Amino acid sequence: MFSPSEWRILVVLTALFLSGAGWHLVEANVPLPPLRTGGQVLVWNDPAESAPVAQESEKDGKQGARPGKTSRKPMLTGLVNPNTASSQALQALPGVGEKMAQRIVDERANGPFKDLEDLQRVKGIGAKKAEKMRPWLRFD
């Protein structure tokens, strides 16, 4: 079944895993490629990247805020197409709030966005903001 050297390797790996060293290897920061399913591209959430967003949105909460209004920004779970995305989905992009999302929706009525440079025709989206949004955008 197993040779003596294979048994040694198996025992050592099991001992490392049980001692906790193997668990750190499991949690290693290995970038995962996007998952393509049913024509949609899903991006793995990185807890280290999403934690600061949650903390910032909690800081924005003010006492006496209107009921029903939430300061939490939606989390991205995939790539966003600015030509078809809802206003709420656009608000999940970095640097895009309620007003900016509405400007994007209004501007796409003048024609679809072909690329990132084309998105810059929206008032308030310059080269820097567009570059921050690049990893989260797709243009079909």
Image (cartoon, grey):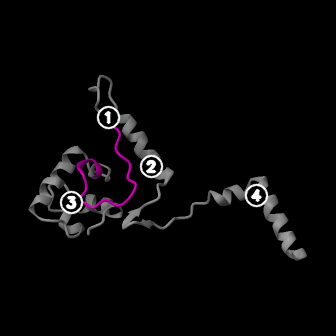
Q: Is residue 35 magenta?
A: no
Q: Tell me, for residue 24, which label it has, or none.
A: none
Image coords of residue 120 (percent x, y): 18, 62
Q: Which residue is mark 4?
A: 17
Q: CA distance from mark 2 to mark 4?
A: 28 Å
Q: Tell me, for residue 70, which label it has, or none.
A: 1
Quadrant of image for the C terminus: bottom left
Comes first in the chain, label 1 or label 3? 1
Q: Which residue is mark 3?
A: 126
Disc 1 crowd, CA 10 A, few/some/many (<14, 14-19, 20+) = few
Task: Look at discs 2 and 3 and give the one toward the viewer.
Answer: 2
Q: CA distance from mark 4 to mark 1?
A: 43 Å
Image coords of residue 66 (percent x, y): 26, 26
Disc 3 crowd, CA 10 A, few/some/many (<14, 14-19, 20+) = few
Q: CA distance from mark 2 to mark 3?
A: 24 Å
Residue under the point 16% across and 65% down: 112
Q: Which residue is mark 2?
A: 50
Residue under the point 27% across and 61% down: 81
